[in-house]
Image: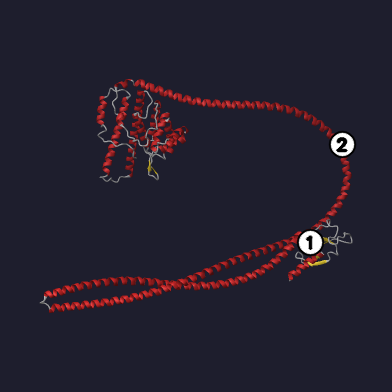
Amino acid sequence: IKEDFEIIDEKQIPSTTELKNEEKEKTEEARWSAPILSLAKKASENLALSYGNALKSASLVGFISKPVSNDSTAKTSVRCHAMEERANLMNMMKLSIKILIQSALSLGRTLDSDFPPLQQFFVVLEHCLKHGLKVKKTFIGQNKSFFGPLELVEKLCPEASDIATSVKNLPELKTAVGRGRAWLYLALMQKKLADYLKVLLDHKHLLSEFYEPDALMMEEEGAVIVGLLVGLNVIDANLCLKGEDLDSQVGVIDFSLYLKETQDGDGKQDGGITAVLDQKHYVEELNRHLSCTVADLQNKIDCLEKTNSKLQEELAAATDRIGSLQEEQQQLKQQNELIRERSEKSVEVTKEDTKVELDTYKQSRQGLDEMYSDVWKQLKEEKKIRLELEKELELQIGMKTEMEIAMKLLEKDTHEKQDTLVALRQQLEEVKAINLQMFHKSQNAESSLQQKTEAISSFEGKTNEMMTSMKQMEERLQHAEKARQAAEERCNKMKQELAGRLDTCQQQMSQLDSKCSTLEKELKSEKEQRQTLQKELHQEKDAATLLKTELQQMEGLKKELRKLQDEKQQLEKVCEEQEQALQEMGLHLSQSKLKMEDIKEVNKALKGHTWLKDDEATHCKQCEKEFSISRRKHHCRNCGDIFCNTCSSNELALPSYPKPVRVCDTCHTLLLQRCSSNSS
């Protein structure tokens, strides 16, 4: 666990022997200075040991490789180191609080932010809060600030919301460290720093998100420091946050404040200062408790007054209700007496009426028994007739349901045939579009074939020309080589013949060398031309291979064209077959539509005509003659109306009846017309 302490040389820190000598010399110091010096000695010894170890480890990191140790020894060393750090920080906190209280009381005024002991107190407190902080990784980098746990105080204690809002509203603060320092300043000015930190320590499960388990705030030392901070309620501080740069302050502990020699005069005033301190602290605690109790009592008084007023209102309403209920009770008693008198009179009258009604009932019952026997006989006859009619109705309903099912099946067939017609038409259009596309593709392929054949013919001409030029160049080369050989032979002959004439031979040799150089230059140029021509030949050969591949592709395209044309012919055949099937389907559809119309008309006739009852008809519907014993009623089995015998003498076979049934004249003519139209 790394802390932000400044590393100091061991020479600057006083050794233990020097501190012991100073302790012997200063035996006659004041009472209050002795514990401060003892704490300073302990802190300096612990810090010297820790800083010495840190310096040694830092110096050995770059040069000596660390030996591999067991996990248990490493953990124990880390724990010991953490315990030492916690003890050092707690001792430094005790020293800084004691010196701050003593210096503030000696001054006797409110402290500013420039006061050195106050600055050192905030530095030590910051180190205590930073001890064991977990490093949080973000997108920008690693973040390690103590403002995170301080933000929890706002949620746990609503009184700290003012501090949090004022810290967030300060525009000068840009870092989390600066906001944390401003929060500590404001909490000290409110004299509630100890209370807020105590709330944090009571919720250690929340602090575990920010601190390691070996941190100072997670151990008992944190509770000790909170107890020490209660003594700071004696101090009045007036700290201005606007002018100070809290973001860039360097937190370095100045040990010179805690190692100064104390004066003799301060020891004399120790008793009075401690008494004043205790009295002031006691008075402030009393005031705080009294203000809390007063606020609680005022709240209780307000609640009692409200409940008292409510009870008084309820009492008044209850008394009013009691009076109204008593009046209603008297009225109800009077009404009960009147009702009793009236009921007694009505009972006497009803007794007389019942006697008279009994006599009349006995006389009427004899007549009713006779009527009942007659009605019972009529009922039996009507039940028989009703059963016959219900059987006929059930037959008609069954025929009707069969007709409806047939209608639905025909409608489904028509819808399916229409859907197939639409799908076949869409397929025809798609086939036509495919044929057009294939025709356009074939035209484009033929045009591109012609262009490529022309390009191949032009390339073949060029290659022929190049071959002829190559042959000419090779002939030139051969001539040049022959000339060179002849020249070399002549030179050899001249050397043999003119051995004595060196001067003339040298001149001739120089001329021959010049000719040879020119010939060599011409040879080089011809070789370069030959290389260029070979390169062009290679390029033309590549182009010829490309053209051959394109020709092969064209042949493949032609094959595909032929396949597509075959497919087109097959599709045309399929189209013709589908058109024939469509024509046949159209014929079937027209026939089914005619049948549907006939069924709809029959259904309309069945729905429109209802079976008339015998009591409803008194005259014949056609001739309008009145029915009698001689002229009887007859139902038409098609329309359901009632006719005489002359108007309903015809008989026809209906779909609801298997045998020929009685039908009226109008229905007979209509049914005959339908049968003739269906047969045609």
The kind of residue on which mark 1 rests is: Cys
The kind of residue on which mark 2 rests is: Glu
User: Disc 1 marks which residue?
Assistant: 639
Nearest the viewer among 612 and 347 is 612
Measured from the top left, where is residue 358 in percent x and y? 87, 41
Nearest the viewer among 435 and 644 is 435
Measured from the top left, where is residue 349 in percent x and y? 85, 35
Q: Quadrant of residue 303?
A: top right
In the rendered structure, the answer to whether residue 664 lies left or right of residue 212 reads right
- Secondary structure under tag 1 reads loop
**Residue 663 visible in the shown view:** no
Q: Quadrant of residue 411?
A: bottom right
For marks 1 and 2, give the one nearer the viewer: 1
Q: How many marks?
A: 2
Q: Is residue 192 above or below residue 559?
A: above
- Disc number for residue 352: 2
In the rendered structure, the answer to whether residue 596 lies left or right of residue 554 reads right
Q: Residue furthest left?
A: 500
Measured from the top left, where is residue 614 in percent x and y? 83, 57
